[in-house]
Amino acid sequence: MKLARRMRALHTSVFTELKAEKERLEQEEQMTVLDFSLGSPDIPPAQSVIDTLCEQAAVPANYRYAVSPLPELVKAIQDWYQEHYEVCLKPSEICLLQGSQEALVNLPLLFCNPHDGYLIPDPYYPAYLDAPRMAEADVLFMPLKEENDYLIDFDAISEEERKKARMMLVNYPNNPTGAVAPDWFIEKLIRFASDNHILVVYDNAYSDLIFDGSKPKSFLSYPGAKEVGVELNSFSKSYGMAGARLGILCGNEDVIAAYRNLKSNMDYGVFLPVQYAGITALKTGSPVVAKTRETYEIRRRLMVSEFSQAGWDLKLPEGTMFVWAKIPDEWQDSFAFAKDLLHETGILVTPGLAFGEQGRRYVRLALVVSSYTIRTAAKRLLDTRFFLRLEH
């Protein structure tokens, strides 16, 4: 059987490959691997959320099709957006998702014809690249460079690319770089999208994971945002519900209406117990969000301090659960570095090249491990002199 041409662009996930190599080393070489690769949150939901999910899962009626979202959940989302971001949302501006990645993958199907342009950042979360390719759109890269604080340089987007682009994906706080966008950047983004008639898809999954006392922001809180785009939000990172798939698409009414129509032909909604758990999370989960933020903030400072003492100078990220780390010049690229790091120290990281060409000289470390694991990794770096030997 021959796969459709659109499937040729898809490859095995780098995380699947890393997991396989980790398992091989642990089984064949009896190595204990310290895994900093996959950004799967290790902080559980509030007990009230777990209790609600269990209680509702025991109700037989909740196993029917959930074609429409629970009105109570829509209201809870409206209240949360108002209190959290000072954004007023109408029910017609909200669509419930089985995790935000659902819409990341499907939105290009709605607005991109073959060879329409789709602007994405580089480095990028892998789904940003796969989604437009599956829609047979042409991917246009927007390099995120350290000298620009990993912000999109709109002036570097050519006139030809502006005319070709139908959509653009923007993500701040940014995975994998940890960068946070200032107000002036969002205002410029909205002007750019409006001037060039480009639909913005703003991935705001990490809005709660910003540090040093900064306040979470929504793209939709800026004037003109609803006219040019939509925002994706998630219960995974803030509320620890990564496995209980629940996300939000909100903003431009026309986009929401079109997506609802597409969704009505694809699934029957989010499992009702998960929706009830989402309501509880939004109403009672603020302490967990604060604790989650505090935990990642402690871990990032610990990692930067401990790893720097071991010879690997890292920069503090402004947000997210990741550290974007530069590799020494001695290695050809981030894949070669990650391989040597794993085999010599048992520390597993994600090569930056898995996120695009701009990640050639970087690797990503996820802060989803304990402080003990971070200290253990730093000790291995010291014991093996993995970085210190490069000084001689």
Image (cartoon, helix red, strand yellow):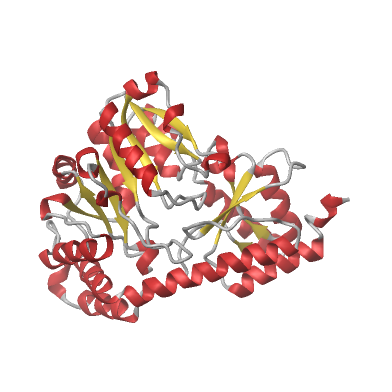
Instruction: Decide if residue 178 is on the left or right side of residue 267.
Output: right
Q: Give percent across and percent down for residue 330.
A: 77, 42
The front one of 36 and 290 is 290
Quadrant where the N terminus is found in the figure = top left
Q: Give percent across and percent down for residue 4.
A: 36, 29
Q: Residue furthest top?
A: 160
Residue located 31% across and 60% down the image: 245
Instruction: Decide if residue 352 is on the left or right side of residue 289.
Output: right
Q: Residue furthest right?
A: 392
Instruction: Locate residue 37: give its quadrant.
Output: bottom right
Instruction: Decide if residue 129 is on the left or right side of residue 278.
Output: right
The front one of 219 and 386 is 219
**With respect to residue 120, does 268 lie above or below?**
below
Q: Give percent across and percent down for residue 324.
A: 57, 51
Residue 61 visible in image: yes
The front one of 1 and 181 is 181
Residue located 35% across and 38% down the image: 188
Q: Give percent across and percent down for residue 110.
A: 23, 35
The front one of 239 and 55 is 239
Residue located 44% across and 69% down the image: 293
